[in-house]
Image (cartoon, coloured by chain):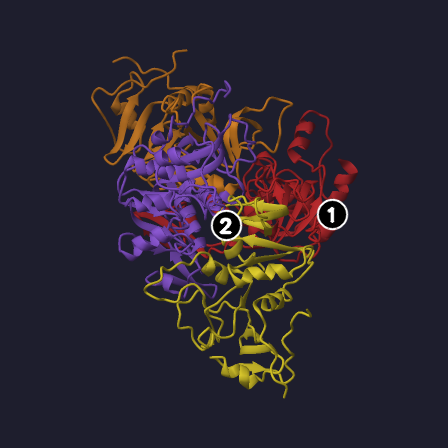
Chain colours: A yellow, B orange, C red, D purple
Amino acid sequence: MTPPMTPLSREQMAWRVAQEIPLRASGGTYVNLGIGMPELVANHLPDDAGIIFHCENGILGMGPVARPGEEDFDLITAGKKPVTVVPGAAFFDSTDSFAMIRGGHIDITVLGAFQISRTGDLANWSTGGADIVPAVGGAMDLAQGAKRVFIITNHQARDGAPKIVETCTYPLTGAGVVSTVFTDLAVIDVTPAGLMVREILDGLSLADLQAKTGAPLTAAADCPALARPQN
Amino acid sequence: MTPPMTPLSREQMAWRVAQEIPLRASGGTYVNLGIGMPELVANHLPDDAGIIFHCENGILGMGPVARPGEEDFDLITAGKKPVTVVPGAAFFDSTDSFAMIRGGHIDITVLGAFQISRTGDLANWSTGGADIVPAVGGAMDLAQGAKRVFIITNHQARDGAPKIVETCTYPLTGAGVVSTVFTDLAVIDVTPAGLMVREILDGLSLADLQAKTGAPLTAAADCPALARPQN
Amino acid sequence: MNGSKIMTIDKRVADIAAAVAGIKDGARVMVSGFGDAGNPTELLHALIDQGARDLCIINNNAGTGRLGLAALMNAGRVRKVICSFPRSSHSEIFQQLHRDGKVELCVVPQGTLAERIRAGGAGIGGFFTPTSAGTPLAEGKETRVIDGIEHVLEHPIHADVALIKADKADPLGNLTYRLAARNFAPAMCMAAELSIVQTAKIVAPGDINAEDVVTPGIFVDRIVHVPDPISEAEVLLQQEAGSGEAATGTNQQQAAGL
Amino acid sequence: MNGSKIMTIDKRVADIAAAVAGIKDGARVMVSGFGDAGNPTELLHALIDQGARDLCIINNNAGTGRLGLAALMNAGRVRKVICSFPRSSHSEIFQQLHRDGKVELCVVPQGTLAERIRAGGAGIGGFFTPTSAGTPLAEGKETRVIDGIEHVLEHPIHADVALIKADKADPLGNLTYRLAARNFAPAMCMAAELSIVQTAKIVAPGDINAEDVVTPGIFVDRIVHVPDPISEAEVLLQQEAGSGEAATGTNQQQAAGL
C-alpha cells in the first residue's frame, strides 16, 4: 500500500468543490458562496461558465473583488468586501434576496462547518461558548433553503477532533440539510443510507479515514481517488 | 316642520364624501376609491389637494381618465378603465400594492355596499345568489386593511329595504370594518356606542330616518343638516 | 448581443411553440395580467396549439373577450380557475362554462391571492391574515386571534408553469414591465417551477440598469420575443370604432386575421 | 422643483435635527444598512444629539467602527439590539457593552429578520418558515410540520421609527437606492410608523421614472437632504493609507473633524 498523498490544501479543496458545480448550463447555475474558505471556490471557476453568484445582501451577478482604489462600499459582499458586478447583474432588497434563498431558487450554496452529522445536520454558526456573542447572519436560511448544500472543511478540527460526527454537539444551523462534504481527505455524500465516501485521498484506506471520522462511513470497493488539480 | 329636501344625488353624495377627505396635508392623504359610485368622489376633490390615489393593480398617483385616442391599456384602474398618472406616480406589483392596503398604509378607502350592520360589518361583494358567479377582487383586503372605510350608498335598496341593518344577511366582506356611512339621507358614524347620526337631510326627522333603517340610530338633539354642494 | 463573459447563459427560445413545449396535461399554470394589462395572450394561444388540457389556471380574473385565457377556456382545456374576480365585463365564456359545471372556480381575495403566490415563491409555509376573517371565504380555514384581531391561516400557491408578459428582457432573464402591466407577474415568476416569458423587447445584458431590474433572472427559465403583442382591449376599441375584425382563437388565426 | 399640481405634498424637513425630532425614549428604531452599505450615519448622529435613550434597535448588524450605530451605542442610548450578525469585524463597542450586560441581544436569522419586518409592514400576523427549525433559535417557538417539513411560527416586527439612507428622493417620498445599499431599507420603510429618510439627492416629482421607484412615497414620512454622506469604511481605508483622521461621534464632531 502506497503512503497517503498530502491532504488537499485549501485552494485544492476549493478546486475540488468547483468541479462539482455544473458549468455552461444555458439556464445558468445560481451559486451562493459563504464567507471564508467557500469564497475561494470562485477562483477555480472559469469566467464564461454560466455561473451567477448570489450575495445575500442583494446582488445577483457578483463579479471579481474590486481593485484597490476602485472600492465602492455600497457594493460589497456578504463578507463586507468591496466587489464588482458582471453585465446582467441585478440589485434587490433583503426580502427578495432571501426569497431566492428560502424559496429554493439557489442551486448550490457552499458553506464552512464546525460539525456535520451522519444525517446531514450542520453546525457552523456558533460553538455555543458563553463568552462568544452569537451571530447567525444568513447561515440558517442558506442551509435550509438552497437546493444543494456543499460543505468545504478540513476533515478534522485543529485539535484532531472529527468534524463529521454521529450527532452535532455544537448548536445546529439546520437539520438534515447537507448534500455533500468536501474535505482535505475525501468527498462524502449524505444519503438516506448514511455517509457514502465517493472519493478518498490516494493511499488512504477507508479504515484510516474512518479513524478520523466520528460517524460510520461506507464506500464502494473501487472508490476512486480524491481528484486534485494537475498543477 | 319643513318637508324634507330632495335626497342627495349620486354626485352630491360623492361631494359629501369628498368633504371628509383631509386636503393639503403636507404628508399627503392616500385614498383608494372602489369601483362604481366611489369613483365619482374624485370629481369633487381639487387637483392640488395633496391627495394620492392608489389603484390596487399597482399604481400610486392615479390621475384623470385617459382622453379618447390616448388610452393605454397597460395603464388602467382596478375597474379596467384607461387612466393617466400624475408626476411623482409609482408603479409596483400586486404584492406591494396589497402590502399597502393590508399593512394599514391607505388612509381612506371609499366603497359601495349592499348592507352595513350596526357594528360596522360590511357586505358588498356578493348577494349570495346561487346563479351569480362570486367575485371578490380586492374588496375584503380594502375593507380589512384601510385605516378608515367610508361607505357611499343610497340609504335604501331599490325595493325599499334598508341597507343599514342589525345583522347583514348577505355574505360579509369584513366584520366591524366600516367607519362612516354616507347616504343620500344622512351621515352615520359607526361607534362603539352604536350608529350615531352626524348629519341628517334637512327636514327629515330622526324618526323618519329610523323608519328607513334596520338598526337603531342615535343623534344629538342639535344634529346638523346634511351638507350639500351650493350649486 | 455582445461578447460579455456571461453570455453562455441564454434563456431565449426560438419561437413561441418552443416556449410552451412540455407543458403537461393537468398542469397548474399561473397567468400574469390584470384586466388587459400584462396578459401573455400569445403564450396562451401557443398553449392552445400545444394541446395541454385539464389545466388549473391561477390568474386575477377568468378571461375576458375571446382571446388569450378566454380562448383557452373556450377550447375546453381548463378544469379549474383560482382567481379573485371572475365576473369582469366580457367574461361570458367563463361564466357559461362555470354555469354548465365545466370549470371549477376557487375565489380568493386579491391580496391573499398575491400573498399566497409570493409565499409559494419565497418558501413560506403559510401565513396569518385578517383578510376574509368572519366571511364565507374563511369557512373551513384555521383561524387564530392575534393581538385581538381574528386572522385566517392561508397556504402558499405553487405552480408548474407561469406564463408571463414582460416589456424588456435580457438573455439572463432579467425583466421589466410597462406601467401597470406588472401586477402579478413578479410573484408568479417566483412561484412557478418553469417561468415562461413573452417579451416585447430583448436587450443585451447590462442594458437594463441593475438597479432597475424588476424580476431578476433567477426567477425566469424561458424567454420568447413577441415584439408586437395583441391587446384585446385595443381590438374592442377598434371594433367599437368600426375599424376592427372580430378577434378569435389561436396564434395562427391571429396571424391570419389581425 | 416645478409647479406640478401635486406639489402640496412635501415631506422634506429643514435640517437633520428636524428629521429626528420627536423620537421618544424607549422607541423601537429600525436602521437600514448591511455592513457599510446603506447606513444612515448622519441620522444616527442626529439621534445622539436629539437625546432619546433606552432604544431598541433593529438592524442587520450591531454597529461597526466608531460612527453611526456604534456611536449611538457608545453614548449609552441603546437598551436592546435585534439583529442577525452582531459579530462583524470592528464591532468592539457592541461586544463590550453586551459583555458588560448593558445591551440586550436578540439574534434572528437574516432571512427571517427581513421577512418579519416585511410582515410588519404588510399586515401579516405571522408566518411559518423552515429556517431555524431544529436549532436553538427555534427554542420556545411554536412549530408545525407542513408537507413533511418542520416549520417555525415567526411574528411580525413593527417599529416606531425607521432611519433610512436613500440615494434619490422626490418630495412625495419616492425613493431609489445605490447598488447593494438597498438591503433592508424598503421593508423597514413599510414596517415603521414614522419613516425618516436621509437622501444624497433630492429630485422633482416625475424625475424618478415611475417604473423605477423602489420605495413608493406612501411608506415615507420625512426626507432630509444629506448630499455627501460619510462612509466609515472609506474613512478606515483612508486611515490605513495614513491620510485620515480618527472618526468619532456626533454630527458636530463630524462637521468639525472630517
Task: Return the residue found at the far front.
Answer: D242
Q: Which chain contains the residue that carries disc 1?
A: C
Element class at badge 2? loop
- Asked which quadrant contains residue D212, the reply is top right
- Left/right placement of residue A85 relative to residue D63 reads right
Amino acid beneath label 2 = Asn
Q: Does residue C254 show up?
A: yes
Task: Return the residue found at the far right.
Answer: C256
Q: Which chain contains the residue that carries disc 2?
A: A
Crowding at mark 2 (Cα within 10 Å: few <14, some 14-19, many 20+): many
Residue C178 in the image, given as x and y percentages of width and height: 61, 36
- Asked which quadrant contains residue A72, the reply is top right
Amino acid beneath label 1 = Gly
Which residue lies under the disc numbered 2? A57
Residue C7 in the image, given as x and y percentages of width and height: 70, 50
Task: Say the numbered circle drawn on residue C3.
Answer: 1
Q: Is residue A78 above or below residue B79?
A: below
Question: Of B2 and B10, which appears nearest the observer?
Answer: B10
Residue C115 in the image, given as x and y percentages of width and height: 48, 47
Q: Residue at x 69, y 37 (%)?
A: C230
